Every structure is written in structure tokens, then in C-alpha cells.
Image: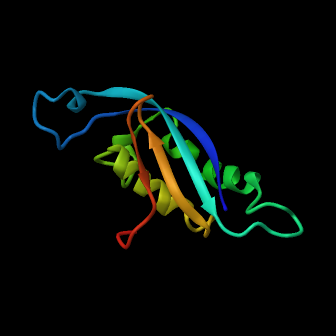
């Protein structure tokens, strides 16, 4: 079973590695929607995979580092693409959520990425 909890943050960024003249090289902001997925068996007594409050607590522990900040100034997010943000979130959340199965980052209403972890982390 997979469950998820969604969070929103407001953050600015620019992409330093795109070509000169690319619109994303300029400072701009997004209302990011972040979805944290956790997978595992349903506990027969409790009836859940994990308490949603545990997911919220894990996210709240790192939220202040990115919400209403310039992501380029956050250690590890010097090139803050959605993909890099998803990997950064995975690395920060995994210790508190060992059953973490996916991070989905929506940068806009129609664009985003999904990350399920890999050997880089």
C-alpha cells in the first residue's frame, strides 16, 4: 500500500547552468507542491501504513530551510531544478521515513518530476 501527504512551499530560484538568455536563468519563483509517498504493509491493528502525522513531522523538520527562501542559497541546492529538489528532499526525509517510496515535486500546475530514490543518495 502506498500513502502520501502533500505540502506546499513558496520559493525563488534561478537555474545557473542553463544557457545565457534562457528564461529560467533569471530569478523567479514558484508555488511548489511536494507530495511525499510512503509504502508498506497496512498494520493490522492500526489500519494504516504510517501515521500521516509522522510524514508531516518529518517534512516540518526541513520546511523552514526551503519555504520562502531562495533555493540557490540552500546547501545542496545550488542548481535547484525540480529534479535536484526531489533528490535533496529524499536525502533529508529518508532518515525519518525509512519507508519513503517517492517524492513528487510540482513546480507549476503542469510541470514536475517524480523521484523514487537511487544509488546516488
The residue sitting at 35% across, 51% down in the picture is 84
The residue sitting at 28% across, 47% down in the picture is 79
4 shown above or below 8 = below
The residue sitting at 60% across, 40% down in the picture is 7
**Residue 9: % across, % down:** 53, 35
Query: Foreground: 71 or 106?
Result: 106
When asked about the image quadrant of residue 82, the answer is: top left
Side of 92 relative to 2 (left or right): left
Residue that extends furthest to the right in the rendered view of this protein = 45
Query: Foreground: 17 or 41?
Result: 41
Query: How many marks do you count on the picture?
Result: 0
**Residue 41: % across, % down:** 71, 69
**Residue 86: % across, % down:** 43, 51
Side of 31 relative to 96 (left or right): left
Residue that extends furthest to the front in the rendered view of this protein = 1
The residue sitting at 49% across, 42% down in the picture is 66
Quadrant of the image containing the N terminus: bottom right
Residue that extends furthest to the left in the rendered view of this protein = 20
Residue that extends furthest to the bottom in the rendered view of this protein = 119
Query: Foreground: 41 or 80?
Result: 41
**Residue 40: % across, % down:** 67, 68
110 shown above or below 118 = above
110 shown above or below 16 = above
Quadrant of the image containing the C terminus: bottom left
Side of 82 relative to 62 (left or right): left
Q: How is the image coloured?
A: rainbow
Amino acid at each position: 500500500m502506498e500513502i502520501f501527504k502533500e505540502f506546499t512551499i513558496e520559493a525563488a530560484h534561478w537555474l545557473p547552468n542553463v544557457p545565457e538568455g534562457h528564461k529560467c536563468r533569471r530569478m523567479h519563483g514558484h508555488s511548489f507542491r511536494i507530495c511525499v509517498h510512503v509504502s508498506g504493509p497496512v498494520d493490522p491493528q492500526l489500519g494504516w501504513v504510517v501515521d500521516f502525522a509522522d510524514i508531516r513531522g518529518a517534512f516540518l523538520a526541513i520546511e523552514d530551510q526551503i519555504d520562502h527562501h531562495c533555493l540557490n542559497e540552500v546547501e545542496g541546492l545550488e542548481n535547484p531544478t525540480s529534479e535536484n529538489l526531489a533528490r535533496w528532499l529524499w536525502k533529508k526525509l529518508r532518515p525519518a521515513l525509512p519507508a519513503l517510496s517517492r517524492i513528487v515535486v510540482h513546480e507549476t500546475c503542469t510541470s514536475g518530476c517524480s523521484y523514487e530514490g537511487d544509488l546516488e543518495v
